[in-house]
Amino acid sequence: MKGKVLFLLSMLWLGQAARAATPPDAADQKAIIARMRVAALSYADHLQDFLCTEFLTRTVDPSGTGKHWKLLETQELELGYISHQEHSKTLKVNGKTTNLDKRVKRAYWMPGGEFGSALLGVFEPRVAAEFEWDHEETSEGRRTCVFRFHVPVTTSSYVIQADQDHVRMALRGAVTAVCETGSVTRLQVETEPASVKRGGRDIAIGMQLDVRYGTVHIAEREYLLPLTATETAPFGKTLTKVEIRFDQYRKYDSSSNIVFDDGK
């Protein structure tokens, strides 16, 4: 009897796996992508003004192999999302509260865009992203759909600034979203190969971004907000990696006297 139960459970698991491996038909895929686009384009409109604490670690690998990382610095910032714009104030660098600007190593990659602009770079109609079904999975009890995407350089809105150069970049990657609502739970973006000229030589530039979103409670309401992000950027043989954790989400009080570093 026990062997029969195990056999039935195995057959049930195989049946579920087979159903999960079967992609939705073209019409269903189109509908899921449409829900994802609506959720991404209206993402900022659904957010209330809030503050959070951003913990950021930057490392560098001069070898370009990804095996020899050296610490640049750690940063703690107060991040504000106010009137649909991101603002930041540096609180600590390497655990210190003085001479903050001098403690931040310049000429290395700095992050940004985790609160919506990265989504727009994929889902705005004018960037003409091409989507392809990849697979289905389950996350926190929710059915999620994963699509691969490609944004051609001719329509991309993503630009990397390297010194005085501004280089428009083609994008590719994957987006994971709740199938029923289209709410994005993970965004993985990678620029396609590009370079700038330095001393007559081609210097490789680019960026990889991986943002994971989760449910956050702010003033008794639920929001889907970034929890972690990792960015890696090459400049020639030098790799810079930025690892970010977002924590302590809270409501922004307009009566608070907060002066952000960006002056906005």
Image: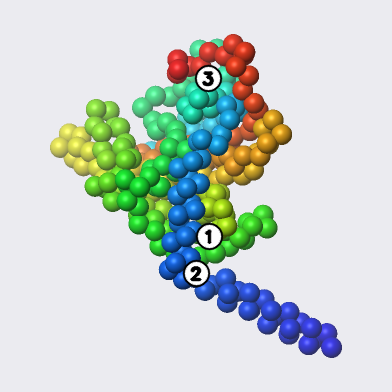
Mark carried by residue 89: 3
Can see residue 102? no
Task: Tell me the residue that label 2 is attached to.
Answer: 24
Task: Tell me the residue that label 1 is attached to.
Answer: 145
Left or right of residue 262: residue 237: left
Residue drawn at point x = 63 percent, y = 19 percent: 253
Give yes or no for contact between labels 1 and 2 (Cβ–Cβ under 8 Å): yes
Dot 1 or dot 2, earlier in sequence: 2
Mark carried by residue 208: none
Alpha-carbon distance for marks 1 and 2? Answer: 10 Å
Q: Using the image as rendered, state which of residue 167 and residue 148 is in the foreground.
A: 148
Number of residues whose C-alpha sits closer than 10 Å to that of mark 3, classed few (under 14), some (14–19) or many (20 or more): some
Left or right of residue 116: residue 14: right
Determine the secondary structure under disc 3: strand
Dot 3 or dot 2, earlier in sequence: 2
Residue drawn at point x = 53 percent, y = 19 percent: 89
Determine the secondary structure under disc 2: loop
Vertical arrangement, residue 95 with respect to residue 10, above or below: above
Percent of width and height locating residue 158: 33, 40
Q: Which quadrant would the C terminus be assigned to in this image?
A: top left
Left or right of residue 16: residue 60: left
- Viewer-side label of 3, 2: 2
Residue drawn at point x = 71 percent, y = 34 percent: 220
